Image (spheres, helix red, strand yellow):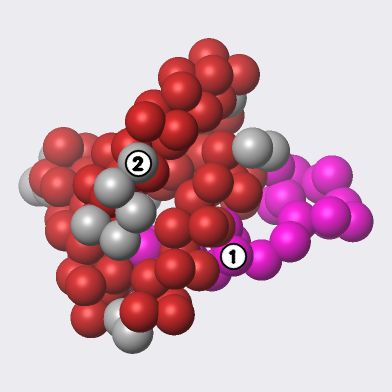
Amino acid sequence: MKVLTAATAFLAVILSSTAGAKEDSKSDALKDQVAYLTSISVPAMKDLCASLYPSFPDGVDVMFQMWLPEHQEQISRGRQAQISGLEPGKSIEEWELSTVESVKQQFNSAPRDKQDKRCLGLITALGQ
């Protein structure tokens, strides 16, 4: 359930605007979590969106390679926060795999218009 909630939150944040958000610790923690989720979800989303837009991976690869170094600290903080909240006996690698699978399942079960929005949302997220 945590995986589904995290993936849903990730997709919701990508599709929503962050303009005007207060720069408090909760906002920073959420940004860290989103950066971390983005970092593990982009490769899967890239492939999923390629089924709709064949040239999608090329553009996303370039954007992702530019985005990663700029967000490395946020990604690290988001990952550490996730590790600290893991259920006993579960590894971060297991959580990441489950999250990516959840993202794939949600994408594949969504209607085409929602899939389009998620692909465009991915581009938007990498452009921030």
Q: Is residue 76 magenta?
A: no
Identified at 35% across, 41% down, the residue is 55
Q: Position of residue 41 (x, y in %)?
A: 33, 46
Q: Quadrant of the C terminus?
A: top right
Q: Specify start and end residues of the magenta stretch as a single range.
A: 5-28
Q: Residue furthest front?
A: 54
Q: Nearer the viewer, residue 108 or 22?
A: 108
Where residue 64 sits: x, y (%)? 46, 28
Q: Amino acid at mark 2?
A: Ser
- Mark closer to the observer (2, 1): 2
Q: Quadrant of residue 36?
A: top left
Q: CA distance from mark 2 to mark 1?
A: 21 Å
Q: Which mark is residue 15?
A: 1
| Cβ atoms at labels 2 and 1 below 8 Å apart | no
User: Residue type at mark 1?
Assistant: Leu
Q: Main secondary structure of the magenta part?
A: helix
Looking at the image, which residue is at 74% across and 61% down? 17
* Disc 2 target residue: 55
Quarter of the figure that contains the N terminus: bottom left
For residue 12, side relative to residue 85 (left or right): right
Give percent across and percent down for residue 89: 10, 47
